[in-house]
Amino acid sequence: MYQVPDQHGKLAVVTGANSGTGKEAAKRLAGAGAHVVLAVRTPAKGEQARSEILAAHPTAQVEVRRLDLADLASVREFVDGLHSDGTPLDLLLNNAGVMNVPQRTETADGFELQLGSNFLGPFALTVQLLPLLLAAPAPRVATMSSGTANRARIDFDDLQATRNYSPTRVYGQSKLADMLMMLHLAELAADRGWPLLSAGAHPGYTRTNLMTSGPTLNGGRPGMLESLLYKIVPSQGPEQGTEPLLYAATSPQAVAGGYYGPRWAVVGPTTTTRLPRSAHNKDVAARLWTKAERLTNVSLPTRDLT
């Protein structure tokens, strides 16, 4: 099992920290000494997760703050709260997401739900938190992608899937977008001389409520093939599935633009994972970043952040 290095004196934000990989990541960061912010859509569920973490680590520093990545006003409110505190942010773990929503659904801002929750919300969060991240001595942004990104492409002509909606295709596109965001942020950091490390991860097939919450949204349910695959594909628990994200966020061996996942693709200990061919196109990554800036009305500050 991966041992998280000492995190005393560090502030970490974990999105989607009330369950699954997010809760496990928060628990292990808190156990290693970090002050952890559980960024959750439903504070009551966040408080339950906080209680569970404190039961395991009674002296841990854990707090709950509301964050709905499907609502840019909520993202701004969350960011404003952290900026008001003025504490440098050492770790941002972009973990929260929604998967395979059966019918096209929109966010509070009119974005397709999977693209909005999985990519545009985390994009706005990350960019707006850059001043706090770059105030820390060695900040990291770890972003959770998915093996489904390997078969995806960015459809700029129908990015919001208004003409052709497929739950699995749109999910894959959103997770490829996360991967491209991670890589472009790493390139920006290198070009601008920022001390920030941006790395990515995927959990393989990890048993969390991500597999059921999305497909059952709006009264839907997983298809027969989907349900069969859930039963026969090898899987692992959150304890193992969270480790690639924790490795990206804390390992001394993690590198900028690195991508980490289970050794055997769907299960296993953490190893370096090869990026799909679709992630190597820097022009696509830059174009997507610019598109996200326009859609969210969030962009890099013009002043020097370091």
Image (cartoon, helix red, strand yellow):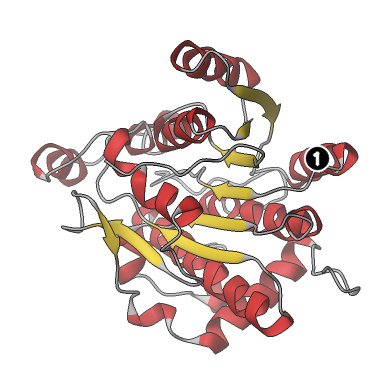
Asked which quadrant contains residue 288, the reply is bottom right
Image label count: 1
Q: Residue at x 41, y 37 (%)?
A: 21
- Residue carrying label 1: 82
Q: Residue at x 64, y 44 (%)?
A: 70
Q: Nearer the viewer, residue 55 or 230?
A: 55
Q: Residue at x 52, y 15 (%)?
A: 54
Judge from the rendering whether residue 295 lies leftward or rightward of residue 14; answer left or right.
right
Q: Nearer the viewer, residue 251 or 176?
A: 251
Q: Amino acid at mark 1?
A: Leu
Residue 266 position, x and y percent, is 20, 52
Residue 30 position, x and y percent, is 53, 30
Secondary structure beneath disc 1? helix
Task: Name the image quarter holding the C terminus.
Answer: bottom right
Residue 301 position, x and y percent, is 86, 69
82 relative to 62, above or below: below
Judge from the rendering whether residue 89 lies leftward or rightward of residue 247; answer left or right.
right
Judge from the rendering whether residue 132 lies leftward or rightward of residue 195; answer left or right.
right
Judge from the rendering whether residue 282 lies leftward or rightward of residue 66; answer left or right.
left
Q: Nearer the viewer, residue 243 or 287?
A: 243
Instruction: Give the crowd class for mark 1: few <14, some 14-19, many >=20 residues within 10 Å.
Output: some
Q: Nearer the viewer, residue 73 or 67?
A: 67
Residue 236 position, x and y percent, is 21, 38
79 relative to 147, above or below: above
